[in-house]
Structure formats: C-alpha cells, structure tokens
Image: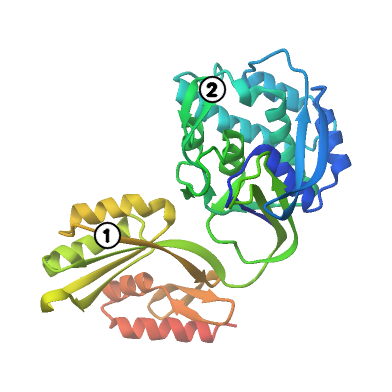
Amino acid sequence: MKIAYIDAFSGIAGDMTIAALLDAGADPQALIAGLDSLGTGATFTIEKTKRQGIAATKFDVAFEDQKKHRHLPHIVKMIEASELLPAAVKQNAIRVFETLGAAEAQVHGTSIEKVHFHEVGAIDSICDIVGACLGFHLLGVEAVYASAVNTGSGTIVCDHGVMPVPTPATALLLKGIPAFARGPETELTTPTGAAILAALSRGFGAMPAMSISASGFGAGTKDFPGLANVVRILIGDSAQTPESTTVSVIEANIDDATPELLGYAMDRLLDAGALDVTLQPVQMKKQRPATLLQVIAKPEDQERLAAMIFAETTTFGLRITRAERRVQARAHVEVETPYGKVRVKTAANGTASPEFEDCRQLALATGQPLKEILAAATAAYRNKP
C-alpha cells in the first residue's frame, strides 16, 4: 500500500502541503488542470526556493475575489461541479471542508451550514485543500500518516482581532492529535493545514514502517532563523517490518500507598485504555521502600490517564516521557482444544501465544488447570495443518 508521512516539525499549511507533494513528484500540470476545473479564475505559481538552506518548492495562488464569505454548501457545489477531479479527490476535499466547518461552527456558536468561512472560504484556501487532496491522488497515496504537529506560539492578527496561537479553530481541529510549540512566536499551523491532518491522517506519531520512494519539502512564505519553515512529506510503500509507534511513558514513585490501592489503580488504568501498567519495587531516598508505577499510553490518552493516576493514588507528581515502541504485525488464529476453542496470537516471525483470557475462561469453565489449557492451545496451533 502506498502511504504518505507528513512531518510537520515546523507546522503545516495548505499551500505548503501542495508544494511538498509537488516536490515529491506530483505532476504539476495535472494538479493545475484540476484546480482550473473549479472555475475560480485563480492562477498558480510553482517555484524552487530555500528555507534555512533546505531546497524546497513554493506554491502560490493569485486571484481576484470579490466575495469574501462562502458557506459550506457553496464550496461543496464548486467541488462537485468539477469535471476533471476524480471522485475520491472530491470526497476527501469535502471531508476536509466539513471537518473545518465543524470547528469554525463551534468557535462561532452556529451550525455548520450557516458558518461563514471567512479566510477559509477564500479562493486560495479552496485551492489549497482541493490541491492537497489531488496531490495525494496523483502520487497514488492510499493512506496518510503524520508526526506530532508544531503549532507555533504567541499571537496573530486576524479578522477577529488579536488571537492566541494556536487559534481557536486550529486548537479544536488538533484535539486528540499530539502537538507542541517550538521556534518563533507566530502561527506555524493554520486551520487549513490542521483540517487536512484531522480529516485525512490515519494516525500520528513516529513514521510508520515504510520503504521510502520519494520525499518533498514544501516551503512556507517566511524564512525563520534557526527553523526551516517547511513541511516534509515522505512517500513510500508500507513495509512488513515491526511497526514503530510513539507512546507516552508515565511514571511515579509511590511510598505511601497500600498494595490494595495500587492494585486497584492498575486495574482502573488498564480498563481506561493504558497499553500496559507495571508495578516495581524500588528503594527511595532515606532508605524508604516504595513502588514504581509505570504506565505506557497512547499520546492522545496521556492527560486522561495522568489525571486518573492523581485521582487513584497518593502521588504528588509524575514523570512523562515519549518513547518509540516497536510492535510486530499480529494476527489471530482460532484453534480447537479438547476443552474448547482458543484464539492464538501470531506474528510474522513465527511467534505464537495463546490468548490468556480465553484460556482462563476455559480453565474456570472446565475445572482443568490453567497450565494444561495453555499447553493444549499451543499444541493445537503447532499441529494445525
């Protein structure tokens, strides 16, 4: 499967996304023809440039637009009326606009049908979103993934006056997406860029396992000192190698909680979606015996699980770090044992392990020792034709 990985280390905007896709090899003539089919009258410029020494492509839209505000239904009609855009491109572009419209509607306290798109409804933003979706299509991309997103910081001036970065709409669009602020105090991720990520990306974090065939840099307008104002896109085929994901590791040293309390906290955290929870005996300062609580979590679950640790344990503080997690591609095979059916988890390298919960349930139901159920499931898998 052909995939794209968006590396938003310096933020992302719609025009930067198109530029990176062009830099990675998307056909510029086909892309411009698709945008011309929208009937906006806009003209497009593609040029090579540099940002902090990195060669990149810059994409610009020029237009004369007398209508400042557009509603979502009007934008959808513009997209659907195109005779050149493939159906998949139209579908993705409309999904991006619907995602963006929902955020704008929430910010302004109105419905998605009534919200004015302001800058987002302008010709350049329409071209940016449609062009990004078309660029992915031209490169044959079937799935999009992305890194954590650099939002920028400080304030900007927009139609509503001075606004904090990320702006309210961008913050809503990035809900559940790992984000950070680094570099100059300015907007690095625009609502358009955030909407593209929120609507199209299947996951966020470390680069998925892939065989890279092309890469491209899309340049933003400004050239910041110390941070290349570009977004990078990597194109390639998904690889059958252990999956690489980013996880949050939450830790606390606890010396004043009972074993019962810690056991209950462990169960609560696992039920709440923690990937793993461990309790380890440690020796703290002043020779105090204690327990190290370690929770591995998805980045989007980090704050929720951290709050649960504070609520369910006696700790006053936590340590949170990011780590890379490698996971073998896994599948389940059901086998028949003398005691009943058991699912066996398998990996591409031949590793196999009976599902503990299946075996536990059979042991309770049949009265047989758990170790015999586990052995029978392993033997059934090994002898499977």
Q: Is residue 127 left or right of residue 262?
A: right
Percent x, y for residue 365? 28, 72
Image point (62%, 66%), residue name:
209
Residue 353's mark? none
Question: Measured along the vertical axis of the image, is residue 207 above or below residue 280?
Answer: above
Which residue lies most toward the front here?
225
Horizontal and vertical percent for residue 177? 48, 47
Disc with the residue nearer the chain's start (1 vs 2): 2
Q: Secondary structure at mark 2?
A: loop
Percent position of residue 321, x then y: 38, 63
Q: Amino acid at mark 1?
A: Leu
Who is closer to the viewer here, 151 or 362?
151
Q: Is residue 136 visible?
A: no
From the image, tell me which residue sits under label 1: 318
Q: Amino acid at mark 2?
A: Ile
Q: Quadrant of the C terminus?
A: bottom right
- State the residue at coordinates (48%, 73%): 345
Measuring from the top left, give residue 224's x and y in whole percent.
61, 45
Q: Which residue is mark 2?
A: 112
**Eye-nearest disc, 1 or 2:** 1
